[in-house]
Structures are given as structure tokens and as C-alpha cells.
Image (cartoon, rainbow, N blue to C red):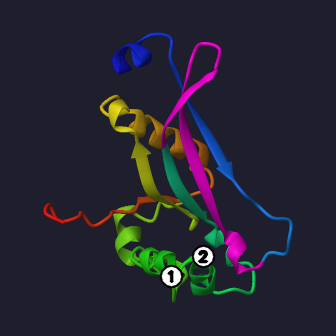
């Protein structure tokens, strides 16, 4: 049944959602949590089922550097995890990407803003159709003007016999 739904008269929609307040620009405002919902629809764009989602962050380093907050304050305000993870590829002392990242991209990164893809979820019966890859391409298409680097968070695999 799944193959017939995906092969006949079905569409995939990518719906993006995020929240933004009207308050002052405190250090937490420079990290945007975004959810990309992957929805299966019919020819009339009626929702059939949510089949997956991608949770990601946009970290606005360029904008934050113009304010009174340090890079560490901006990252740590969101979560300790973000601060620790970002400093794998970002040098908080220089306020720029690490030399390893700069060298890999030959200094061609257009922005210090970055996208951190935290979690990709596709329902098991919809895997194998390249839906996740299509969603990542759509995400990069829509956010590449705002981000110099896209990073996917790698989770440590669980032990087989947990």
C-alpha cells in the first residue's frame, strides 16, 4: 500500500515553522529553532499523513557579533550542548570557523552563520524513497543565503545489546 501511495497521485510538502518574539535582542535571539515537517498529501494538497520531520537550528553569528554578547554567551544561552558542539568547528576566541574548516573550504565560506541539523526522522514505511535527502536539499536551498555552513549532528550509536 505504501508504494501505491507514493507512486500514484501523492505529493510531498515541506512545511517550515519557527517562533520569534517581539522583545529586545537578548543573546538567546540569535539562535532560531526550526522544524521542517514532511507531509504526504493528495492531488488537492489535502494532508494524508505527516511522514517525517527535521529539527534544525540557524545560529546567527554575524548578527550576534554586532551586539554586546560574546559568541559563547549566544551559544550557551540556547544550550550547553550547542556551545560544546559548535566549538568543534567554531573558534570562540577568534569568532570564526576553525582553521581546519577554513582550510577545507579554502576560505570560501560566505557567512559565519551556520545551520545545525539535529534530528532527521522518517517513518519506517516511507524510508528508501530518498525523502530525507530531498528534504535536506530543500532546507539547503531555502537557507543557503543565510548560512555559510551546514552541519549534521552525529549521534553516538547505541550498543547492539542495550
Q: Position of residue 16 (x, y in %)?
A: 63, 44
Q: Position of residue 151 (x, y in %)?
A: 43, 60
The reply to whether the magenta stretch includes residue 96 is no
Q: What is the secondary structure assignment of the residue under circle 2?
A: helix
The chief SS type of the magenta part is: strand
The reply to whether the magenta stretch includes residue 41 is yes
Res. 2 image quadrant? top left
Label 1 belongs to which residue? Answer: 80
Can you say which quadrant of the picture contains the C terminus? bottom left
Query: Is 59 situated above or below 126?
Result: below
- Please name the residue shown 44% across and 35% down the image: 134
Instruction: Name the foreground residue: 90 vs 118.
Output: 118
User: Range of the magenta residues?
Assistant: 26-52
Label 2 belongs to which residue? Answer: 78
- Please name the residue shown 50% across and 80% down the image: 83
Can you say which quadrant of the picture contains the N terminus? top left
* Residue at the outermost left position: 161
- Please name the residue shown 41% across and 73% down the image: 89
Amino acid at each position: 500500500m505504501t508504494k501505491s501511495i507514493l507512486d500514484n497521485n501523492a505529493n510531498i510538502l515541506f512545511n517550515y515553522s519557527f517562533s520569534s518574539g517581539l522583545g529586545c535582542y537578548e543573546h538567546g535571539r540569535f539562535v532560531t529553532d526550526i522544524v521542517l515537517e514532511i507531509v504526504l498529501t493528495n492531488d488537492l494538497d489535502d494532508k494524508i499523513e505527516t511522514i517525517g520531520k527535521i529539527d534544525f537550528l540557524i545560529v546567527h553569528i554575524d548578527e550576534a557579533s554586532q551586539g554586546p554578547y560574546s559568541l559563547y554567551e549566544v551559544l550557551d544561552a540556547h544550550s550547553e550542548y550547542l556551545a560544546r558542539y559548535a566549538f568543534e568547528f567554531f573558534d570562540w576566541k577568534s569568532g570564526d570557523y576553525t582553521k581546519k574548516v577554513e582550510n577545507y573550504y579554502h576560505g570560501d565560506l560566505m557567512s559565519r552563520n551556520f545551520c545545525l541539523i539535529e534530528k532527521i526522522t522518517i517513518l519506517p514505511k516511507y524510508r528508501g524513497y530518498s525523502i530525507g535527502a530531498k528534504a535536506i536539499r530543500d532546507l539547503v536551498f531555502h537557507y543557503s543565503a543565510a548560512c555559510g555552513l551546514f552541519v549534521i549532528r552525529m549521534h553516538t550509536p547505541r550498543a547492539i545489546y542495550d
